[in-house]
Amino acid sequence: MTATTESLAGNRRATPRRPAADAATEGAAFAEEFRRAHRRGRRRAAWLRALLNVTGILLFLAVWEAVPRLGTWVNPVLLPPPSAVFDTFVPMLLSGEIPANILVSLRRSALGFAIATATGVTAGLLTARIGLLHHVSEPILHGFRSVPSIALVPLSVLWFGIGEGSKVALVAWGSFFPIWITTFIGVRDVPAAYLRSAACLGAGRLATLLLVVLPAALPMILAGLRQGIAVSLILLVAAELSGAREGIAYMMSTGHQMFRVDIMLIGLVLLGTFGFIADRLFVALIRRLFPWYTTAS
């Protein structure tokens, strides 16, 4: 027993101790290598996702191109192939017709969404935090929320005219409700333990709102904003079909009157592209501003 103890003590004396600075350096190098591997993994995943997205688009275009050409049961006038749509798209793009309509539609959608964001988040905060205001406004807001926004197109034109006001008002109206209801639910469902902890630490109303309530309700608010973007594009089409003189939906309406399905398809593709790009930009902005908040897609 004594010999074993002496042997272990001898081994400890024989093994040189590493300096603490070397251990810290090795730890930092390992952490940096881990971060690099993590970034490489994320880049590979992003490239793979982009490759799959492009593959899906190409497959869709290939099927679309083949159906009008191979199937005699499909009228190519009613369903022109992508190559014919592209031949129509290029002259309209070079003439400036498509960029002008895109700018008008984007301006209407962005202005309406901005109004809906300001009013929806404010209304959600107030109705969730002030019980009296919630009970007073509950039947009115929920009643209006149940009314389809498209049903308000004639009234919007009557109140605001056929100019920009009716289009922006309709987009703002439709986008307001998903933003309001998600903000309300997010603020209302903040755990009471958070609020009690803030009160115990001496936080005032404003500090509790900014530092506890809003961060806790952030996922629901962002979900409402994301839904509001999609709703704003839907209502943009309805608004522009009700007497507009420019815009993507107006261009589609003109194509309908001229029996030009290719122009109508160009409008649909543009709207779908806008929706996709707007959603991707929103997700990228959220990841940039709130890196701790992760989105599924």
Image (cartoon, rainbow, N blue to C red):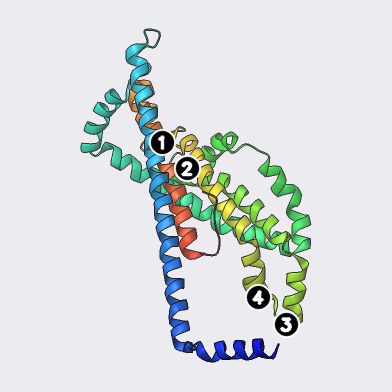
Percent position (x, y) of residue 210?
62, 72
Residue at numbered disc 4: 206
Residue at numbered disc 3: 201
The reply, left or right, for residue 256 in relation to residue 95 is right
Q: Sequence-wise, which precedes: disc 1 or disc 3?
A: 3
Q: Sequence-wise, which precedes: disc 4 or disc 2?
A: 2
Which residue is depicted at the point 74% across and 60% down? 133
Question: If the image is split into quadrants, where does the N terminus sit?
Answer: bottom right
Q: Amino acid at mark 4?
A: Leu
Q: Quadrant of residue 189?
A: bottom right
Q: Sequence-wise, which precedes: disc 3 or disc 4?
A: 3
Q: Answer above or below: position of 110 versus 130.
A: above
Rounded to the nearest whole Å, what is the CA distance between mark 1 and mark 3? 56 Å
Q: Secondary structure at mark 3?
A: loop
User: Does the CB distance between marks 2 and 1 fall below 8 Å?
Assistant: yes
Q: Quadrant of residue 273?
A: top left
Q: Secondary structure at mark 1?
A: loop
User: Does the CB distance between marks 1 and 4 fall below 8 Å?
Assistant: no
Q: Which is more foreground, mark 2 or mark 3?
A: 3
Q: Sequence-wise, which precedes: disc 1 or disc 4?
A: 4
Percent position (x, y) of residue 76?
34, 14
Residue at numbered disc 1: 244
Q: Sequence-wise, which precedes: disc 2 or disc 3?
A: 2
Rounded to the nearest whole Å, what is the CA distance between mark 2 and mark 3? 48 Å
